[in-house]
Image (spheres, rainbow, N blue to C red):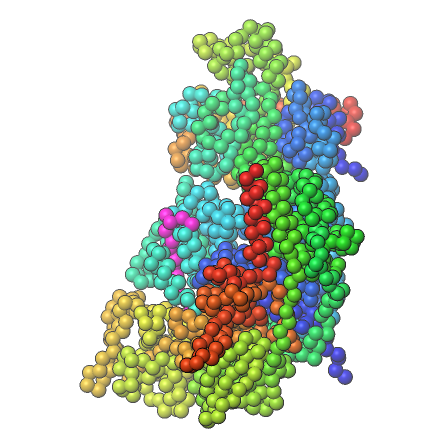
Amino acid sequence: MGIKIFEDLRREIVDRNLCNLCGACLAVCTANNVNALTIHENRPQYNETTPQIQKCLECGICYLICGQIPELNEVIEAKYGAKPPLGSYKYLTIARTTDLTIQEKAQDGGIVTSILKYLLEKNFVDGVIVNQSIEDWNSVPKLITSSEELVQTAGTRYTAIPAVQELGNYRKLNLENPRLAFVGTPCQVQTIRKMQALQVRPGIFVKYLIGLFCMENFDYRTLMKEKLQNELKINLNEIKKLNIKKNFFITLKNGEQIEIPLNELKHLVRENCHYCTDFTNIYADISVGGIGAPQGYSTVLIRTEEGGQLFTNLLLERRIEEFTAEPNNVTQTKAKILSLIKKLGQTKYENGQKTKSRLNKNGDDR
Amino acid sequence: MAMKKIGAVLVIGAGIGGIQASLDLADLGFKVYVIDKSPAIGGIMAQLDKTFPTNDCSMCILAPKMVEVGRNPNIQLFSYTELVKLEGTAGNFIATIRKKPRFIDESRCKNCGVCASVCPVRVPDEFNETLTVRSASHIPFPQAVPAIYLIDPEACLYLQKGICRLCEKVCEAHAIDFNQKEELLTLNIGAVILSAGADTFNPSILPQFGYQSFENVITSTEFERILNASGPFGGHVVRPSDHRSPKKILWILCVGSRNRKLNNNYCSSVCCMYSIKEAVIAKEHDPNIEGYIAFMDIRAVGKGFDEYYQRAKELGITFLKARVSNLEEDPSTQNIIVSYENIETNTFHTEEFDLVVLSVGFQPSNSTRELCKTLGIELNEYNFCATHPFNPLMTSKPGIFVCGTLSAPKDIPETVAESSGAAGMVSSLLQSERFNLIVKKEYPPEFDVENQEPRIGAFICHCGINIGAVVNVPEVVEFVKTLPNVVYAEENLYTCSQDTQEKIKQIIKEYNLNRVVIASCTPRTHEPLFQNTIREAGLNPYLFELVNIREQCSWVHMSEPLNATEKAKKLVAMTIAKARLFRPVKELSIPIKQSGVVIGGGIAGLTAALELANQGFEVVLIEKEKELGGLVKNIYYTLENENPQEFLRNLINEVNTSEKIKLLMNANIESISGYIGNFEINVRKKGELETIQAGIIIVATGGQEYKPTEYLYGEDERILTQQDLELKISGGELNAKQVVMIQCVGSRNETRPYCSKICCSVAIKNALKLKSLDPEIQISILHKDIRTYGFKEPYYEKAREVGINFIRFDENRPPILEKHGDSLQISVYDIFSQKELSFNPDLVVLSAAFLPTDNEELAQMLKVPRDQNGFFLEAHVKLRPLDFATEGIFLCGAAQWPKFIPETIAQAKGAAARAAIILSKESIRVPGITARVNEDLCIGCGSCQELCPYNAIEMRYTEKLLERGSIRTYQAHVLEAVCKGCGTCVSACPLQAINLPHFTNTQILEMVKVLTKEAAK
């Protein structure tokens, strides 16, 4: 049996619109030092301009670690006790940052930015991969090495970017054993765990994985340009914040709020997201989301030993604080959140399973 | 019928011990098979950053020896290999060994590293104690011998998952071989040397230290790697948790040693010194570091050790006599909170440190335990290889010898001495087979090139992509072709590969080349290979030179390919310019007088003489006293309760009956002249002068007990030295009820800053003896530290158990002895109880310093140095403990430093082996590059003689008769046998009267011209 290589990935995943656009295949590609692969029109593909000799070395690693390829699923499921719908976790809590600058920019409780700031300031990592805003609510993944660069990265954009690809830029740090932190969606976190299962770079360098809750994701072009700008005539420069709670909320800088029902956007959701079964980011060290939390707070799931230690240290240093109210009230809020994310998680899991089985019936040649 | 003896030896374990044993054995004329379970040789020493007490770079002194093991034609190295079984008896064994697959073809791998650079896997790097990562295809460390990569099958994606094979796709040497299988081989050998070493203790089993739970608690080996420039942090002293510089570092000594619960009652002997060294070096790296050392006793017993300890104190390292009970981590800072009891102040403390280093001791490894089981070798109670104190290099099985830390904790020089000693014992056993199995190379006659126009051939190496990816090799080749006298130039993917050697020879013939220049990697590893190639083609090996365009060009200018190419051209052009002036250099051969002289008839001299005799050489043993035996004459029992008198009698008897040994008793040496292979010693005996010719000299002049001027010694018969006491005990004439012993009398003070090493153990030995003779006797030992290192430690413990009282005094407040009327009174301030104590002993025993014998005159005659304390100074305190810097002269025993009987025996055997290497040859070859004096120019100023580090220059005179008397005109004369070709004299000579062949002034100026001409362009 031959090794399956990028050509197979292209045929089985990319050409069928199943690509998560995480960029992992580019990140692990040895030949990518000389640009064997590229992302063009939101699809990873062979770089046609690269000379033949430098093309794909047919190692097959990209295929094995692709989030849409099931081969290593069992390995990481066993390791992280990844039972649907919520995966394994140590505890759930509600928290927010104590840092006012972060609070101002934050999507919800500013937990993710606070964690990254802590890791960089304490020199526990050499770099973190974040989404950095560029013009018109577009963003690019960026490897940053100092906490000063962090604040402009806070806040959520609901468009898919190849964040895992940016991990490949660890080479720029010129370190033999760089220590990285990564923030991303469930599909991105999952592929990094697969790299770790194989002990391959760059995933093996990721010491902390901060997972975001994720219901689905969009393409920048279709959501922001075509829907918001062209169809709804929203000036993208005037947007202050985007938020998906029950519906899609757009807050403008002038304070105006626009609400779009989610089913109106359904057709814009990326195809790959329909196959996803993970809402709460079950492979992360710490999962963070806004769902269910009181205003200005985030819902946090502590999953691993490392995640627990990290979160405790932030609490000890008073960089973040947990939600306080009447004890009963806290317990009730947590219970409410738990049942909510369980429900959403279950829904996503079931929908994902359904889509998958449909795909299999329709002739999956894998 | 006795089996035929085999002149080959198996050395198991290639740390520094196995390396030294292998090199000595090969030099002694035996075929050596050396196996090591690791993929690279070097053992623990390869992991060390610096060595105490000289702060030598460990790798820098070890690497040349590793390289020599790798390339010596009579040493066959099997790395990544283990012993399966051993059959047969002394003289003729069959060993079965198992060689693990590297998945890389050893004959093809060129050490270029491309496989590792593409390997996507990263796993913890064992060589760096998992503080960083490596790829699946890797080489353990850059200087590794063999310089061959290997693939870790546990990590390799192909071997685990069937994917990847990237290394295979990029390896231009086609060295990757995933089909490699484990190989079983059998070797026929005459003897075995076990030098498998010991592990360092794994502190995970001691929960109080939190090792593994707390990132900033590390072992001393990890700290060595952190200090090292090629270590995980590039030599920056940072702590693991946050890679930031620690300010306060605490070393905790005796972790896993002196621990009864673990059955590790022994002292590991080296941890005190390496911890002090680590603290000193850390401070050198970063002066802001505060070093603290928590210790029980500081055991600075070796040469220069106590002085090093004192210097560390002066540097501001804080020594805490403390028992550490627990470590905790502050979760927010990852600092370590240490709870300890300060034993000196009797106070409990908790103190925060940024980093804690656990100074772990030696522990016999499971694999060596298995090995000894396989061999049927007895172990001692701590699972080290069992040896007898008077036969320290012999295992329980004939034909199997042991050296290094496999038999007891010890430091590098002791290991090296033992390794030479073990090689010597093998040499005695297999004496009849010497030179039978070794390779003697035959070469064709050399062409005469003297009057030929230079015809230079140049070979420029790509070294895979190592050079080729940076330097434009074809461009360099084209450039070289334009240079005058170059008649041939080509590029090679690997100039060092076997097929290229054949090609070079063929081209030499085809183009009638008479000079060869190769531009590739380092001469350190490759010069002998290429010299051999051109010699095989009939050219003198000095008609060749290697240009290093890898380490000195492509590797350091990786990001500037254009400049690197220009530099490569310049480097090659310079050597080509020099090559035009190459002339053949004749190697000299100096005849050897195949007999030896041993100076000193104590156990060191007796053992050395006997070893030489056993190896078949005539020996003259010179003793100034009328009786043999030296110091051991005064030793009646040992700490281990052996009888040294009986041992000495047997030894003297053997010497007396040996036909090879001639004794000169009551003899005084008057003068010594000559050099290696040809010494002349004038000895006066009862007025008669005798001249002895010898190839080598072994110095074994021993030492003596200091006669104290302190503590009323000599004024009262109740005041004795330990030696006096022992004599009285053995005579049964002692009747004391209260005894006080005072340690360090005459040592560790201003006049004699060194520790005399043996006195603590001797005091305990005598105290235990007294106690066994009279259990009611009261004994107090007043000391600064108790320095019972190694397996002597359990006796210290025993002494405390039987009620011997140990009182530690401050070095600035020594005990005071006074005589009141007829009674003796000792007062001492006890650090532990913080009380002034007073005794009225009926016997006071002084543990007096150990002094070298009167050796100043002898040192002058031998032209060898002594250290600041008057002991003879060896060539290198770590790796040449038995040699003097002057070749052909060796030393052993207490002449070098105070030591116990087993150490003395090991050294004596080692010195004899080192000497036998010379004596076993009829002549020695001297490399041709030795200084040459132009007699027309030399004015006999003597500058060269003064500067020569090897005593290789003699000033010789000619007498000119004048009308009234005569004058002497001096001229420098180079002793070619001694000259190392370092060139110091050449640069020092004010008249340029000295030159070094192959590095002549004209040749070097020619190179400079090319460089400056290029620069002027």
Q: Is residue B108 above or below residue B960?
A: above
Image side of residue B729 versus residue A190, left or right: left
Quarter of the view holding residue B70: bottom right
Image spot of residue B596 (x, y percent): 57, 81
User: Is A114 in front, or is B968?
Assistant: B968
In the image, residue A355 above or below residue B651:
above
Horizontal side of residue A174 vs B833, given as left or right: right
Residue B804 seen: yes
Residue nearest the viewer, comparing B128 with B356: B128
Q: Is residue A280 left or right of residue A100?
A: right
Residue A45 vs residue B607, the one in the foreground = B607
Measuring from the top left, give residue B592's x and y in whole percent: 62, 77
In the picture, the quarter occupied by the C terminus of chain B is top right
**Where B573 falls versus B841 (above or below)?**
above
Residue A338 visible in the picture: no
Query: Residue B292 occupies which quadrant of the picture?
Result: bottom left
Q: Which residues are magenta?
A: B285-301
Rendered location of residue B295, percent (x, y) = 39, 61
Q: Is residue B294 magenta?
A: yes
The residue shown at (41%, 42%) is B333
Q: Position of residue B850 (x, y in %)?
A: 39, 77
Residue at (33% x, 58% y) in the render: B314
